[in-house]
Image: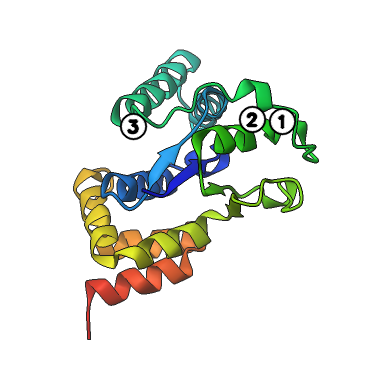
Amino acid sequence: MFAVVLDTCVLWPSLQRDFLLTMAIEGLYRPLWSSAILAELEEHEARKLVRRGARADQARASAESLISQLTTHFDDARVEGWEPLEGSFGLPDPDDEHVVAAAVIGGAGAIVTDNVKDMPADRVPRQIQVVRPAVFAAETVEISPERALRALRTIALRHRNPRHTVAELIDLLEERYAMDDAAAQLRAALDPA
């Protein structure tokens, strides 16, 4: 199965994370991350919740719960032993080295990130593509629009406050994350002509 490192910036927006990871549950790809990615995600998630009005202790507990859920549901996603490669790629932002190191050690075919400018092709090993989440979503949906649609149906069942239909979720993916191509494929699968 195609393995992909999901960068922190991809895992932080909740609906995007839910969509991408539910497609992984559907068997469309295998997600990977490092302990550094999870630590960053936990920190950013707690800050987001505080900005939205949660108490600091509640925000920390919710962020810890998220990381616990990720490590429980994707118990083979954490890449170990990437640390010796950190700093060996000469990336413009040294703080991104751990992402490429995890991709190399994890045998990933791609890194999904919004931070493509800091991972130039001449610094990332050739066998690893660096793609934006909207491109990755479209390519993943294309593998099996039916399974991607099943992922959205699963998400719709979980959304309770507020409730969302599958069609509304498709609209949100397009509006929030510019997943236009994935949305078009999902709409075609939802309502075949």
State the residue position of label 1: 95
* Pointer 3 with pointer 1, Cβ within 8 A: no
Task: Indicate the amino acid at tag 2.
Answer: His
Q: Is residue 54 left or right of residue 96?
A: left
In the image: residue 26, left or right of residue 40: left
What is the crowding at mark 2: few (fewer than 14 residues within 10 Å), some, or many (at least 20)? Answer: many
Numbered label attached to residue 62: none
Which residue shows up at 50% across the image and 35% down it?
106
Nearer the camera: disc 2 or disc 1? 2
Q: Quadrant of the C terminus?
A: bottom left
Residue 120 location (% of width, % of height) = 74, 51
Q: Earlier in the sequence, mark 3 or mark 1?
A: 3
Asked if labels 2 and 3 touch by Cβ distance under 8 angstroms, the answer is no
| Residue 154: % across, % down | 21, 49
Looking at the rendered structure, the secondary structure element under dot 3 is loop
Q: Which residue is mark 3?
A: 74
> Which residue is at a point 41% across and 49% down the rendered structure image?
2
User: Do the numbered discs 2 and 1 sit on residues whose CB atoms are within 8 Å?
Assistant: yes
In whole angstroms, how far apart are the C-alphas of marks 3 and 1?
24 Å
Residue 131 in which image quadrant: bottom right
**Residue type indicated by callout 3:** Phe
Whether residue 34 is visible to the viewer of this picture, yes or no, is yes
Please name the amino acid that badge 1 sits on. Asp
Question: Residue at the spot x=47%, y=45% of the render?
Answer: 4
Horizontal and vertical percent position of residue 51: 54, 30
Secondary structure state at the residue bearing disc 1 = helix
Q: Nearer the viewer, residue 72 or 88?
A: 88
**Dot placed on the residue nearer the N-terminal end, 3 or 2:** 3
Q: In this rendered view, identify the residue nearer to me: 15 or 29.
A: 29
> On the image, numbered disc 2 is attached to which residue?
98
Q: Distance between the Cα atoms at labels 3 and 2? A: 19 Å
